[in-house]
Image (spheres, rainbow, N blue to C red):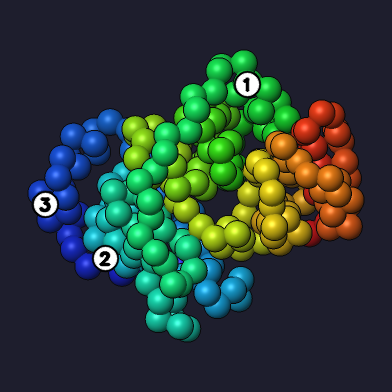
Amino acid sequence: MGAIRTRRSFAFGLKHAGGLKGRAQGTLRAVHLLLTDRLTCPRCGPGFGLILLADCLVARRVLEGALGCPNCRERYPIRDGFGDLRPPPRDPLPQPQPLPQPSGEASDDLAALLGIVEGPGNVALVGRLAAHADALAERITGAEVVAISASSARVGEHEGVSRLVSGARPPFRPGTFRALAMSGDVGALEETVRLVARGGRVVLERALVGSAERLQRSGTRILLQENDWIVGLIETG
């Protein structure tokens, strides 16, 4: 477990963080405590972990606080359970636009492509596919679904879902995820693939021309390439 510093007591957080007591009795959609140990500094790179400075922890989830880098001293805020892991300089986040609500059938299909039926472990959904986070948390019991999208900043609560936004490369240690799904133009595709453990799957929606070849060069075996979907199996790592 990475270093943790609690700057306010648990009781103080419940009293002053605005309705958290009720949220503690139900489900929380906030950054999971164990996930913070897998995060790295977006500015300094994968060799530098982050220190959690927790203002309020509820049910092992971080609702308020920051993640600090001991190397560059940059701090990445966690507000209302949502982590801002964009590298500096960070402009204010625009008003988040709600993602289209996917159908149950579409979420079933995505779960099948990811190839995971139960936890433990972490599953990442990047970009517009983060809209499936709630549904996948229900379908893959015991796993933590990580919704990486600015649009997940203002969504309802759901058990088993962590929410954050990042730059082009999600700042996690290699092998953090059992599976990862992303959509559209992925500039840091090769680096993102390294975040998936050996034997895990990478799912690309709206894959661009050349994406399959890039995956293969990164040690990924293509399992499916149909329409604008690609599914690959990580064979290195």
Report crowding for label 3: few under 14, some 14 to 19, many 20 or more residues within 10 A (C-alpha): few
- Mark number, residue 16: 3
Residue 213 picture location, percent across and down = 89, 51
Q: Nearer the viewer, mark 3 or mark 1?
A: 1
Report crowding for label 2: few under 14, some 14 to 19, many 20 or more residues within 10 A (C-alpha): few
* C-alpha separation, residue under disc 1 versus residue under disc 2: 40 Å
Q: Say which residue label 2 marks.
A: 6
Tell me the amino acid under the disc marked 3: His
Report crowding for label 1: few under 14, some 14 to 19, many 20 or more residues within 10 A (C-alpha): few
Residue 13 picture location, percent across and down = 17, 53
Q: Earlier in the sequence, mark 3 or mark 1?
A: 3
Q: Earlier in the sequence, mark 2 or mark 3?
A: 2
Quadrant assignment for the C terminus: bottom right
Tell me the amino acid under the disc marked 2: Thr
Q: Are marks 1 and 2 in contact (CB under 8 Å)?
A: no
Q: At 29% from the left edge and 61% from the top edge, which residue is drawn?
A: 65
- Mark number, residue 106: 1
* C-alpha separation, residue under disc 3 versus residue under disc 1: 40 Å
SS assignment at label 3: helix
Residue 2 picture location, percent across and down = 46, 67
Name the image quarter holding residue 69: bottom left
Name the image quarter holding residue 179: top right
SS assignment at label 1: helix
Q: Nearer the viewer, mark 2 or mark 3?
A: 3
